[in-house]
Image: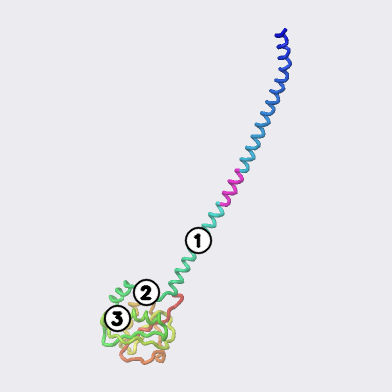
Amino acid sequence: MAWFNSIETLSKLIPIAQILIVILTIFTIWASVHRGNLEKQEKAKLAQEISQTKSITEDLTQKNIDLDAELKESKTKLSDLKKKTEPRSVLPEQKAKLAQLLPPSTTFQIVAACRLMDTESYNYAEELIGVFKDLKWQIGKTNQTFLDDIQGDVVVAITEDGQRPVADRISKALNEIGIKTSYETIRKESISGIQANTVYLIVGARKLSH
């Protein structure tokens, strides 16, 4: 009788177990589907974040490229401005070559002239005239006066026609080392106290476009 009751009880439990299995199966399917949806959402969110990060990175990279280009341009402009405004100077290699190209000293002296109150031109004139001094030319005191402006850096002016061949060689030598020497007529009144038997090395003001 007890065995029969056990069978009866078991037969009643089986439908319940079956229902539980069905519920468990449905829950498992739902959980799996829900997890799949969550994974899809997470993947979509992650993909969106990656895309946004990539876009930001590309923007920053482009900005860095633009900033680098602007920096290079600024450095170039600064270098050009420095070249245009820094005092002129005769480089050692220019002095050495000029000494080789210049004619030997003559019976007449050479004098530098520059504009009054123009310290840059005066210092440049002194550098140039120093090369002639080293070659034992007769050197006069640099003439600071109310000069008219000149087109080039230097004008070689003569006081006698016989000085022309030497003056031409001086002009050619200066041009060869990169110092722009022009042929211009200089008003006698623009140089005070002109000395006879003298070649004048007239140094113009610093050109900003130089």
- Please tell me whether residue 38 is drawn above or below residue 187 in the rendered image: above
Q: CA distance from mark 3 to mark 2?
A: 17 Å
User: Residue at (63%, 38%) from the top-left corner?
Assistant: 40
- Please tell me whether residue 125 is drawn above or below residue 191 in the rendered image: above
Q: Which residue is mark 2?
A: 178
- Residue 167: within the magenta? no
Q: Which residue is mark 3?
A: 132
Circle 3 SS class: helix
Sequence order check: which comes first, mark 3 or mark 2? 3
Residues packed near mark 1 inside 10 Å, few (<14), some (14 to 19) or many (20 plus): few
Dominant secondary structure of the residues highlighted in magenta in the image: helix
Region of the chain picked out in magenta, as a range = 46-56
Q: Label 2 amino acid?
A: Gly
- Residue 51: within the magenta? yes
Circle 2 SS class: loop
- Asked which colour scheme the image uses, the reply is rainbow
Give the label, 3 or 2, closer to the camera: 3
